[in-house]
Amino acid sequence: MNTDRVLGIGAIALSLIVGIVLFVGISNLGNRVETGNKMLFDQIMGVNNTVVRVNNALVVVDSTVTVIDTVKIPEIFQEIINLNKRVDSVAIKADKAVRSAGYANSRASKIEAEQKRLKHEIDSLKSISVQVADTTGAVEGGGLFGDEEESPF
């Protein structure tokens, strides 16, 4: 029994020690990664450049450039989103204009067809009136009623 108890307490103590070591190691890992990144940036970008942390991002500060601004990146994305919204609204307006133009064209073609129909009807009425005038002799007699004296007007 005592052996089981000692083994249990030993296992708990060992797990606590391993947990503390892991916690300390993980918390120091972030600092080591940052210094490692700074060393890599120094090797790649040159010794004159420094690396600064801005909004959880490593930014290279050059001697010729004040700061490569990563803070403005969200603003640029917002401007792009706003421009896309404007483009979408213009596209919607263009679609409406195209639909309106199509409607106007169909109305114009309907009006032209109606004009042709009416012109054909007027021509047929003219030919009918000429035929009526021919049958009554109005063309030869000088009027619809023959002589001017017989006209009721």
Image: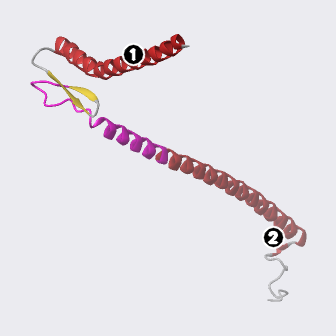
Residue in the image at 40% along x and 44% along y: 82
Q: Position of residue 10 (x, y in %)?
A: 45, 14
Q: Is residue 66 magenta?
A: yes
Query: Which residue was labeled with disc 1?
Result: 18
* Residue type, label 1: Val
Q: Is residue 122 above or below residue 7?
A: below
Front-most of residues 16 and 70:
16
Query: Which residue was labeled with disc 2?
Result: 139
Q: Does the magenta stretch include residue 25?
A: no
Front-most of residues 137 and 104:
104
Residue in the image at 51% along x and 10% along y: 3
Is 1 on the left-hand or right-hand side of 87? Answer: right
For the N terminus, the quadrant is top right
Q: Is mark 1 on a helix, strand or loop?
A: helix
Disc number placed over residue 135 in the picture, else none: none
Q: In this view, does 96 lie above or below 123?
A: above
Work out whether mark 1 precedes mark 2 in sequence or the reverse, and give the earlier one: 1
Residue at the right extreme, as displayed: 135
Span of residues in magenta: 60-89
Residue in the image at 28% along x and 28% along y: 57
Q: Are marks 1 and 2 in contact (CB under 8 Å)?
A: no
For the C terminus, the quadrant is bottom right
Q: Distance between the residues labelled 1 and 2?
A: 126 Å
Is 57 on the left-hand or right-hand side of 81? Answer: left
Q: Position of residue 118 (x, y in %)?
A: 75, 61
Q: Is residue 46 above or below residue 141?
A: above
* Residue type, label 2: Val
Q: Position of residue 54 (x, y in %)?
A: 24, 32
Label 1 crowd bin: few (<14), some (14–19), many (20+), radius 10 Å? few
Q: What element carries label 2?
A: helix
